[in-house]
Image (spheres, coloured by chain):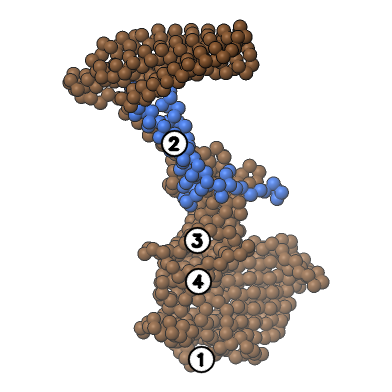
Amino acid sequence: MAQSVKPISSPVPEPWYPTLAVLMLAVGLIVTASFFIYEATSSKKNRSLAKELTTGAVASVFLGFGSLFLLLASGVYV
Amino acid sequence: MRAIGGGGCNRVLLSILFAVSFSVLSAAPVFSDLVISKLDRRVDLTSQNVRSFTALKVENTGVDSVSEILLPFPDHQAKNLAFFIATIVEEKGKSKTYSNSLPINVVNPEGMPPSLIWYSVSLPKELGKGERLSLEIRAVFTHTLRPFPEKITQADIQLVVFQDSAYYLSPYTVKAQSLTVKLPEPKVESYTKLENTKLSGSEIKYGPYENLSPFSYTPIVVHFVSNGPFAVAKELVREIEISHWGNVQITEHYSIIHAGAQSVGEFSRLDYQARPHLRGASAVSHLTAKLPPRAHSVYYRDEIGNISTSNLWSDSTKTLLEIEPRYPMFGGWKTSFTIGYGLPLHDFLFQSEGRRFLNISFGSPINELVIDNLTVKVVLPEGSKDITVSIPFPVKQWQELKFSHLDMVGRPVVVLEKTNVAPEHNQYFQVHYRFSNLSLFQEPLMLISGFFFFFIACIIYMHADLTISKTSASYVAKLQWDEVQTAIQQFQSIMNRCLAIHDKLEASLRDLSRTGDAQACKAARKAADSSLKELSRELKPLLAFLQSSPQAAQILHKVDELVVKEKELQEKLMLKHTTVVDAFEKKSGGRDTESRVATIQQKITALRQEVDDLLEVIDEI
């Protein structure tokens, strides 16, 4: 049994958290910006729901992971 | 001794009572034929905890084999007994090997006075006739040293009284025994002098005494100076929170009292600051916590906020945190505070046979702290199942739920509760549980879905028509303007596609001059012709709509101009294409052709510029 005991560590190395947070939040905010630009500039008839949903989904994935890493980097271990 | 007065009298009376009851006992039947051939007892009084270490050699002189050894304690000692282990020592030459600690149970032999509490040590194998055994017993008593006098001023030193028996209280005959009492300082107010008593430095030695019958008891009293910290945590709640994202967060809430001699009179901060060793010798000025190595994010605060009087040192084996309470603590004074720190996950969490376990120490990291009520809460991550605890001493345990950051169903909490905890209880314990790695992604998924719902809400808002009056003039105008906008955007996209086709044609010409493949160039021309035709067909209804719409009037002339310019551009481009391809096929590429192409090219460039400008103008509307 003794040899099968192995320490568990985080799936992502902890020193990466701040970098990951900044990168993913930056990408997320850029995609969010493009989402809102599209919403504001395209007219109602030309707007495609699929494009809106994909942009929103991509933005939320980046913002979600970005904010998770921001929490972890700032010491709020969820 | 005179100074002890009333309290001392009581104790003496009590001791006489004991002596009487034991002399009665000595007539009682002998428990077994065990004989303690040699017994060495050391009592360490250097801190507020009384640590007794007893090495004894047991011999079975009877016929029957024996499987347990009885160790009685007077009840006033037993109620303060915090920690108690017995191990068998095997001596081979000079090296000693220790067995695991033996199981100890409280037993109640019949016909014994209730003032004795009996502990029975079960031997791993029976002790046969004539066999010998070496045993070591460690016991820690808390709240045993009694301050005397009970009230002192700031300038006084603290004196305490320790009481015990000079002879080891045993139901067996003891052939030879001795007792050594170790004091913190070589300052003794008084001590009971028996035969063979010797005081040397900070040690008092009683014995050796030989051939004592069972239940021999001679009280001794030692009255000495002890200024060590008498810090007692009335209540300590330790919360150990595991995050699989790489951290074990520990938060400890202390409420500490100085359990030494009560402080009377006024407290002078000035005197204390000027001469802390004379005017505050008995005070607890600081506490030292030995945290595990690589502890990070350490904080020390109370209800008011951060307490800045702390120091932190760290090396590869430990992290030392020295904290100073907001005021020096004199006898009877209380304080409460919280310390917290984070530890790296891989030092404490392990995987074995598909289960995970936390391996962490139980007690407080603070040196020489007695804890009256210790509650350890292990907060496991959400989704942990099949939780078991293995701990080397008995504790009360149950489970709770805790809601923390990003929780849906709550985190399972294992609560362990123990009273009367000595520093010796600072042992490792394990919490085993099952956890799936997929549960780790529950938190990011929650964040992602939160953001996604926000985007969905935005989409719904943009698509919803929230106008109340659907017939008002402004609403109708807005609807029409929307339609015009839609048409213009479609018009723009068609124009852009036309321009893209133009670029493609130019590219095919460049390819021609590079590769000389006229067929490919012609094919490109054909494709461009057909797509341009299609685009012009698409353009027609849009233009018709824009012409009919009154709202588009202001922009219409720009649109028309753009259409005309684009046609012109298209024609020139086709002309250039035809000229170049013809010239290539006839191999007539002379100066004549070149100049013609150059003039066309000039026009094309000018037209292209105009078209781009117009597109920009329309875009701005």
Provide the chain ID for the residue under circle 2: A
Secondary structure at numbered mark 1: loop
Q: Point out which mark residue B298 bears.
A: 3
Horizontal and vertical percent position of residue B178:
67, 82
User: What amino acid is at disc 3?
Assistant: Val
In the image, B620 versus B101, the foreground residue is: B620
Provide the chain ID for the residue under circle 4: B
Displayed quadrant of residue B361? bottom right
User: Of discs 1 and 4, which sits in the foreground?
Assistant: 4
The first of marks 1 and 4 along the sequence is 1
User: What amino acid is at disc 2?
Assistant: Ile
The first of marks 4 and 3 along the sequence is 4
Residue B433 appears in the picture as rendered: no
Q: Within 10 Å of the Cα at label 4, are there few (<14), some (14-19), or many (20+) other Cα atoms? A: some
Reply above or below: B494 against B344. Answer: above
Horizontal and vertical percent position of residue B548:
26, 11
Q: Is residue B104 left or right of residue B300?
A: right
In the figure, the shade used to draw chain B is brown
Quote the CA–CA distance across marks 4 and 2.
51 Å
